[in-house]
């Protein structure tokens, strides 16, 4: 779940109780405006505004790349 802040919340699908949370960073800066979450190959891939990004596989909230959506 996201709320537009740099924080992602992970909920139990049965109870909707929060089971984990993770702040997303691009370098040292928090990534604001997280929304439209997608779950792809075991990764949560949020967008920030109109800029989807790739999180690291370790799940520690580090952005390892931005996806260029120019022209889409």
Image (cartoon, rainbow, N blue to C red):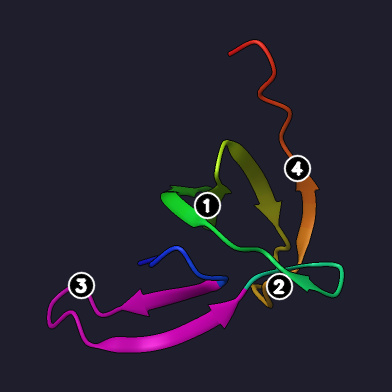
The local secondary structure at tag 1 comes to: strand
The residue that disc 3 covers is 13
Do residues under tags 1 and 2 come within 8 Å of each other at their CB atoms?
A: no
Residue at 71% x, 73% y is 58
Distance CA(mark 4)–CA(mark 3): 28 Å
What are the residue bounds of the magenta stretch?
7-23
Q: Position of residue 20 (x, y in %)?
A: 43, 87
Q: 3 and 16: which one is in front?
A: 3
The residue that disc 4 covers is 66
Q: Residue furthest top?
A: 71
The residue that disc 1 covers is 46
Q: Residue furthest left?
A: 15
Examine the structure image and report whether residue 14 is included in the region drawn in magenta: yes
* Precedes in sequence: disc 2 or disc 4: 2
Examine the structure image and report whether residue 4 is included in the region drawn in magenta: no
Observer-side mark, 3 or 1, equals 1
* Precedes in sequence: disc 2 or disc 3: 3
Q: 49 and 43: which one is in front?
A: 49
Disc 4 crowd rating (10 Å Cα; few below 14, some 14-19, many 20+) is some
Q: Position of residue 35 (x, y in %)?
A: 44, 53
The residue that disc 2 covers is 58
Q: Looking at the image, is 44 positioned above or below residue 14?
A: above
Q: Main secondary structure of the magenta part?
A: strand
Q: What is the quadrant of the C terminus in the image? A: top right
Disc 2 crowd rating (10 Å Cα; few below 14, some 14-19, many 20+) is few
Report the number of discs: 4
Disc 1 crowd rating (10 Å Cα; few below 14, some 14-19, many 20+) is many
Residue at 13% x, 83% y is 15
* Precedes in sequence: disc 1 or disc 2: 1
Disc 3 crowd rating (10 Å Cα; few below 14, some 14-19, many 20+) is few
Distance CA(mark 1)–CA(mark 2): 16 Å
């Amino acid at each position: 779940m996201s709320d537009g802040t740099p924080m992602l919340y992970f909920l139990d699908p049965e109870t909707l109780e929060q089971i984990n949370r993770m702040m997303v960073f691009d370098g040292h800066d928090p990534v604001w405006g997280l929304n439209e979450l997608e779950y792809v190959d075991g990764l949560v891939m949020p967008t920030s505004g109109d800029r989807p990004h790739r999180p690291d596989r370790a799940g520690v909230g580090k952005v390892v790349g931005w996806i260029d959506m120019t022209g889409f």
